[in-house]
Image (cartoon, rainbow, N blue to C red):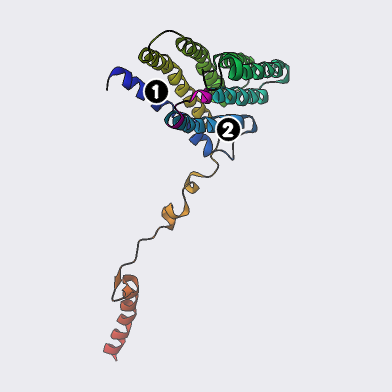
């Protein structure tokens, strides 16, 4: 395996990163606070898109539309989360920002790049810029109140950290990928450049998912750890299979032997 094949395999492995926060959120889905439920829906949808992306590449040989769907889910669900976390005076830009994103996403999928032709560099850039602004406002809001717990003890801080880590690089990656596919390079060179440019974006996406998984660990489990397994796996409900001798279990034979001992002693004494 040469360097390019290894880098391609690494990118494919890192694309499965959303499964980790989805698993962490799944075992806590009944105890998640109202404000963080859109994040759980986002990682769940992201996990579904991981399998849809693999299916589209193998069957249709076209997964461009998955990038468009991913951007829409990213912006809508995380913006909804910030709408529930931020105070009202900081939410004035959210409706206007979402209207602008909807228009740009529609134009990007129909006129500018096409839903099945090119990646959605315009809607991704606009959506990530909107999320970066909301994340900065949120971190600023968290640091204004000194009486609150430290940032590392607050799950909402890791949400904003995840947004800043991924969205700050994703804008550049999407624009660069869109540019190289319009250059006059041969197919082999374009594929290698795509793999090279996608690597930082995929790596930071995996880091983002790791931060979201860490955010979920602040919330209690839906069930107690001892009750998380099925009943048939509980050690307290497990009993060894009885050994049989002459059609009877060894326990019954021992009981009969204990009952016969007093009778034999009474017969000898009589």
The residue at 63%/26% (across/down) is 81
> Where 189 sits versus 78, above or below?
above
Residue 261, x across and y down, in percent: 30, 80
Query: In x, y percent, where is residue 6?
Result: 32, 22
Within 10 angstroms of label 1, few (less than 14), some, or many (20 or more) residues?
A: many
**Which segment is the magenta one?**
59-67
Of labels 2 and 1, earlier in sequence is: 1
Pointer 1 residue: 11
Q: Residue at x 49, y 46 (%)?
A: 228
Q: Indicate the quadrant containing the C terminus: top left, top right, bottom left or bottom right.
A: bottom left
Q: What residue is rendered at 49% in x and 28% in y?
A: 214
- Residue 210, magenta (yes or no): no
The crowd level at tag 2 (other Cα within 10 Å; few <14, some 14-19, many 20+) is some
Report x, y in % for residue 112.
Answer: 58, 14
Give the residue number, with chain letter if any, for mark 2: 41
Q: Is residue 47 visible?
A: yes
Give the quadrant of residue 142. top right
Position of residue 246 relative to residue 171, above or below, is below
Which sits in the foreground, 260 or 15?
15
Quadrant showing the N terminus? top left
Front residue of this view, candidates 53 and 99: 53
Regarding mark 1 in the picture, which secondary structure is present there?
helix
Q: How many marks?
A: 2
Q: Residue at x 35, y 20 (%)?
A: 7
Say whether residue 154 is visible. no
Locate residue 155, reporting x and y percent: 56, 26
């Amino acid at each position: 395996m040469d360097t390019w094949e290894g880098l391609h395999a690494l990118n494919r492995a890192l694309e499965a990163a959303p499964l980790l926060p989805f698993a962490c959120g799944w075992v806590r889905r009944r105890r998640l606070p109202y404000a963080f439920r859109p994040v759980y829906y986002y990682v769940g949808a992201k996990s579904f898109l991981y399998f849809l992306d693999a299916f589209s590449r193998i069957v249709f040989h076209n997964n461009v539309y998955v990038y468009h769907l991913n951007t829409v889910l990213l912006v809508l669900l995380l913006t909804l989360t910030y709408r529930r976390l931020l105070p009202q005076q900081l939410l004035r830009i959210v409706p206007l920002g979402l209207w602008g994103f909807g228009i740009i996403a529609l134009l990007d999928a129909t006129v500018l790049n096409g839903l099945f032709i090119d990646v959605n560099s315009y809607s991704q850039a606009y959506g990530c810029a909107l999320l970066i602004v909301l994340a900065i406002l949120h971190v600023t809001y968290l640091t204004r109140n000194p009486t609150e717990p430290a940032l590392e003890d607050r799950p909402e801080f890791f949400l904003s950290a995840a947004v800043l880590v991924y969205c700050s690089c994703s804008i550049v990656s999407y624009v660069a990928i869109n540019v190289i596919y319009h250059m006059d390079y041969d197919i082999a060179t374009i594929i290698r450049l795509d793999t090279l440019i996608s690597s930082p974006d995929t790596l930071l996406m995996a880091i983002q998912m790791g931060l979201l998984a860490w955010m979920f660990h602040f919330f209690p489990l839906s069930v107690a750890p001892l009750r998380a397994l099925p009943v048939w796996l509980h050690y307290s409900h497990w009993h060894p299979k009885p050994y049989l001798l002459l059609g009877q279990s060894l326990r019954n034979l021992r009981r009969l032997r204990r009952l016969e001992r007093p009778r034999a002693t009474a017969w000898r004494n009589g």
